[in-house]
Amino acid sequence: MQVQSRNILFVIAKIVAVLVSLLYIGYHIESRASLIHDSERLLNSLTTGSSRYWIVASLILMLINYSLETQKWRLLASTVESISFLKAVRSVFTGTTISFFTPNRVGEFAGRILHLGEGHRIRGALAAFVGSSAQLLVTIQAGFIALLFYTPTILPSNQMMIVLLQIAIVISVVFLMVGWFRVPKLSLLFEKIEWLKKYNNFGEVFSHFHKRELAMTYLYSLLRYFVFCTQQYLLFKAFHIDVNYLTCLELSAISFLVITLVPSIALGELGVRGGINLVVFATVTNDSAAILISTFSLWCINLALPALLGAFSLLYIRFGKFE
């Protein structure tokens, strides 16, 4: 009887969590949409001209984006537990939902490991860390490379400083790459540092990431990054911002870099994204409403919609996993 009562309470808790997530995300989207004074252009673009096709293409790319992330998570999780594609999808979406309410999306780890078996969660969190660090690495590297081409604009009158800054950027990009591919060495920290020795059975998961796994993880992260940038470009096309793909790629790289480095939570990230994009893309358009609408659309497609799907994936978590 006690177990049955606990099962009922757990089911109720999951339903409440889903309802709260739906209401909270919906309220946030509505409140942010009202800040865009020219928001009727969003609705018009959905029903007229070629804009609807650009938006549909962005939605398709969202599916590709999360398919890539799912495959990356399956690869990472395989060092801990073999999971199906469907289970990996639920894990990724649940992680997105929980990250929605945590600073710099750190809750993504917690959401993903909820779907792993008992006893695998800590090692799963460490495996998820490897994947997140790969995505962070790509974002920083791409941002630095974009800055490499923009240093003459930033420092137009100081040739020596331009050269020194460019050299520093190149060294940083290479150093970050070499350093990240030494992830397996992290397991040694759990063997040599006294207070980490008792967690050695968890830290050894890093030793399972060989060059092939790391290379594939990096490749998945790189492909996802180009999907992000392409979505940004397509939404600019949808809202009639005239910018070529290469320029959009460069400016998006700078924008994503700054967004990544600024502490925020996903619920407040939309305002941060909008403010940064207004500054970064001011070089290609003075249509601030179009920038805000495209930023809002990208945020909804890549974060809000998956977070809603993740709220429902919480229903698949069984009570038995927490006994």
Image (tube, helix red, strand yellow):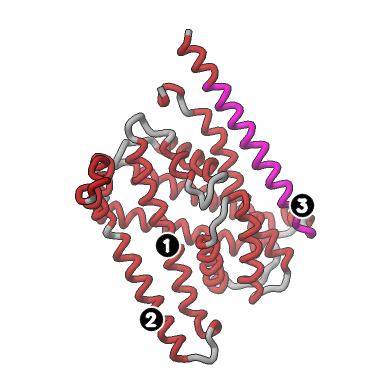
Residue type (three-letter) at the residue carrying disc 2: Ile
Residue 312 visible to an observer of this rendering:
yes
Q: Is residue 124 left or right of residue 19?
A: left
What x and y, as percent, mark residue 120?
33, 35
Residue 207 visible to an observer of this rendering:
no
**Circles 3 and 1: CB atoms closer than 8 Å:** no
Comparing 159 with 94, the one in front is 159
Name the residue tied to disc 1.
138
The circle on residue 167 is 2
Q: Is residue 301 magenta?
A: no
Q: Residues within 10 Å of mark 3 (few under 14, many from 20)?
A: few
- Give the mark nearest the N terminus, 3 or 1: 3
What x and y, as percent, mark residue 242?
66, 71
Comparing 242 with 173, the one in front is 173
Prevailing SS of the magenta stretch = helix
Instruction: Tell me the magenta residue range.
Output: 10-38
Q: Answer with the quarter of the image where residue 282 lies.
A: bottom right
- Give the mark nearest the N terminus, 2 or 1: 1
**Point 41% across, 76% down: residue:** 169
Q: Answer with the quarter of the image where residue 295 lies.
A: bottom right
